[in-house]
Amino acid sequence: MGDKPILGFIGLGVMGEPMCRNLARKSGAKVVASDLRPEPLAALAADGVEAASSVADLVARCDIIFLSLPGEQQVRDLCLGPDGILAHARAGQTVVDTSTSPVPLAQELGRKFAEKGVDFADAPVARTRQAAVDGTLAITVGGDAATLERIRPYLACMANDITHCGGHGAGEAVKLLNNMVVSLTTVALAEAITVARRSGVVSDKVLFEALSKGSADSFVLRSHGMKSLLPDDHPLRAFPVTYMLKDLSYALGLAESAGLELRSANVAKALLERTIELGYGDQYHTAVVRAVDSKE
């Protein structure tokens, strides 16, 4: 191995492709990538990213392996499957999961990789696809401090906020609870704007502008509220209803394991489920306003 480790990146979706591109452009390290689709691999070739022939090939060639996958099942299959990362890993490697997964899975991966002498960090990312493109994500990290310091220069290629949250699973816990708060705030804003529109007493635009000047102001109001709920624009290829439902379900699982029943989060979950039933599951999660406004 030379001065810099060889970096691997598995999962080149909406977030993964721009994250991998930033690694290739900024890290000064060789990057090898893998995805089920050829298109992002072809696009990243222009940035010097090499395509691995298989997961086994990528693991054999790389020192630090980043994952960006849709959720629990994909992470579990890739890491723990019969031909997965753990099966091919060797002592001294590091695996960094930037996916959003349940806390117990991150803890399990930490234990199982450690048994092979492999360091693991859960490092889920927050913020938008544009932040992934710009390299201004926020990353919450679970794992030991030494592992974080080793991977920090590479995380910094993709993010401008990196927070060490604690041991394995802590990074996922913070991300899940963050998204729970975002979802609940989005539902509150969806309800407020629907009341304004249905009652006719105040315009939706005046309502949100006034809220932004008072104690109800928030990032969610200025971003999700102003940019999606107000223009009633809930685009595809953003963070969809189905993903928010997944994250909220993981957060509720964490709460349940702590002996808690979160009533308001369960209401938000039911509204997201209803939004999917209405046919808006692939739209940006602000489409929950469809369930709020549903007459059924």
Image: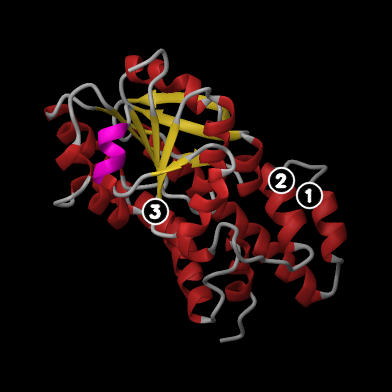
Q: Which residue is located at x 28 percent, y 57 percent?
A: 73
Q: Name the residue type under label 2.
A: Ala
Residue 236's x, y, as percent? 62, 66
Q: Name the residue type under label 1.
A: Leu
Q: Which residue is located at x 63 percent, y 33 percent?
A: 136
**Dot 2 and dot 3 residues touching (CB under 8 Å):** no
Q: Which residue is mark 2?
A: 216
What secondary structure is marked by label 2? loop
**Dot 2 and dot 1 residues touching (CB under 8 Å):** yes
Residue 151's x, y, as percent? 41, 22
| Marks 1 and 3, how far apart at CA | 26 Å
Please tell me in which quadrant of the rendered image residue 196 appears. bottom right
What secondary structure is marked by label 1? helix
Tag shown at residue 262 = 3
Tag shown at residue 211 = 1
Q: Nearer the viewer, residue 24 or 176?
A: 24
Q: Give the crowd class for mark 3: few <14, some 14-19, many >=20 residues within 10 Å.
A: few
| Marks 2 and 1, how far apart at CA | 5 Å
Q: Nearer the viewer, residue 19 or 3?
A: 3
Was residue 198 drawn as part of the magenta stretch in this picture? no
Residue 113's x, y, as percent? 19, 32
Q: Which residues are magenta?
A: 56-61
Quarter of the picture holding the C terminus: bottom right
